[in-house]
Image: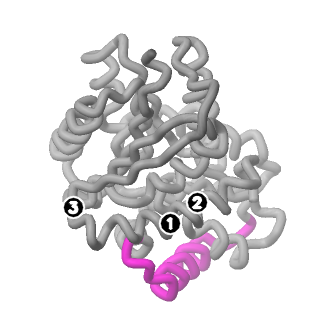
């Protein structure tokens, strides 16, 4: 009956809710537990050892709820911890996320690709390997503080931040890669700021498809019944949970195109 068990999904805060929206769209019958580690957010400016410690704590909380798989809905946590955790738990399904540089590279037609991500994500070896393979024309753009603007729902601050980044980058840009799950909530804002021919990509849809493949291979796919979502936080529920609920509705709207290019 393991197929009836929930799938755990987590991020340092609320950004992984954008991934959750894509997971729900791909697998509407699954039961999900989303854990936002808001007490320790953000991960993207912390030392690697501290991020790994935080991720281990979250895994303990989720596995204590008998989840059948865990999705790391955080680029930084994936880069820091996924390989280590898979080595320690080889029989347990762990699905990560990474910046959508490969699909951006395949869409490139002579211009540049801007990769917006946290400073730690861009420093790690995992990203350097991704750049070595798919990074022709790509410009890594560290965005300290942008995640916090999303968490604070500071739209004016986020818009000013993105305008400054785009002005510094100049043109032409063939694509913008959102290398942090928080940034996906800024997609509608970016769409208004960028030419229609500039693609905006993230790793959420690919992560959702990978979860489906893994569950199918292991015969863990829930094939009947209604899906559900439970939202949890390591921080103050009174502050975090209402924000999560609001962002889940936004994530569902963003996930509807499902092609990652809108």
Instruction: List the residue tagged with mark 2.
Output: 251
Quadrant housing the N terminus: top left
Left or right position of 121 against 31? left
Q: Which residue is mark 1?
A: 247
Secondary structure beneath label 2:
helix
Q: Are marks 1 and 2 in contact (CB under 8 Å)?
A: yes
Horizontal side of 66 relative to 178 (left or right) equals left
Residue most extreme to the front:
225
Q: What segment is highlighted magenta in the picture?
A: 151-172
* Location of residue 176 in the rendering, given as x and y in whole percent from the top left corner: 64, 59
Q: Does residue 201 lie above or below 165 as drawn?
A: above
Q: How many neighbours does mark 1 have within 10 angstroms: few (below 14), some (14-19), or many (20 or more)? A: many
Question: Crowding near pointer 3: few (<14 within 10 Å), some, many (20+)?
Answer: some
**Vertical placement of residue 112 versus 54, above or below:** below
Disc 2 packing (10 Å; few <14; some 14–19; many ≥20): many
Displayed quadrant of residue 41: bottom left
């Amino acid at each position: 009956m393991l197929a009836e068990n929930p799938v755990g999904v987590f991020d340092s805060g609320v950004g992984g809710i954008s991934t959750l929206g894509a997971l729900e769209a791909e697998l509407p019958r699954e039961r999900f537990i989303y854990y936002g580690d808001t007490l320790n957010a953000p991960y993207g400016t912390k030392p690697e050892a501290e991020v790994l410690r935080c991720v281990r704590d979250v895994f303990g909380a989720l596995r204590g709820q008998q989840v059948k798989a865990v999705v790391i809905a955080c680029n930084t946590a994936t880069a820091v911890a996924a390989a280590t955790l898979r080595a320690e738990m080889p029989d347990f399904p762990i699905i990560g996320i990474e910046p959508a540089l490969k699909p951006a590279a395949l869409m490139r037609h002579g211009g540049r690709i801007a990769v917006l991500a946290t400073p730690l994500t861009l420093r790690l070896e995992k990203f350097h390997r991704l750049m070595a393979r798919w990074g022709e024309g790509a410009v890594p753009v560290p965005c300290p503080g942008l995640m916090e603007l999303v968490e604070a729902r500071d739209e004016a601050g986020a818009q000013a931040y993105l305008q400054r980044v785009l002005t510094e980058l100049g043109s032409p840009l063939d694509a913008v890669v959102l290398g942090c799950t928080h940034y996906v909530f800024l997609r509608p804002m970016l769409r208004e700021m960028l030419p229609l021919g500039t693609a905006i990509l993230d790793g959420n849809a690919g992560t959702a498809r990978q979860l489906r493949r893994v569950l199918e291979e292991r015969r863990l796919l829930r094939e009947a019944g209604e899906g559900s979502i439970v939202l949890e936080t390591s921080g103050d529920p009174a502050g975090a949970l209402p924000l999560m609920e609001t962002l889940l509705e936004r994530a569902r709207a963003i996930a509807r195109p499902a092609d990652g290019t809108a």
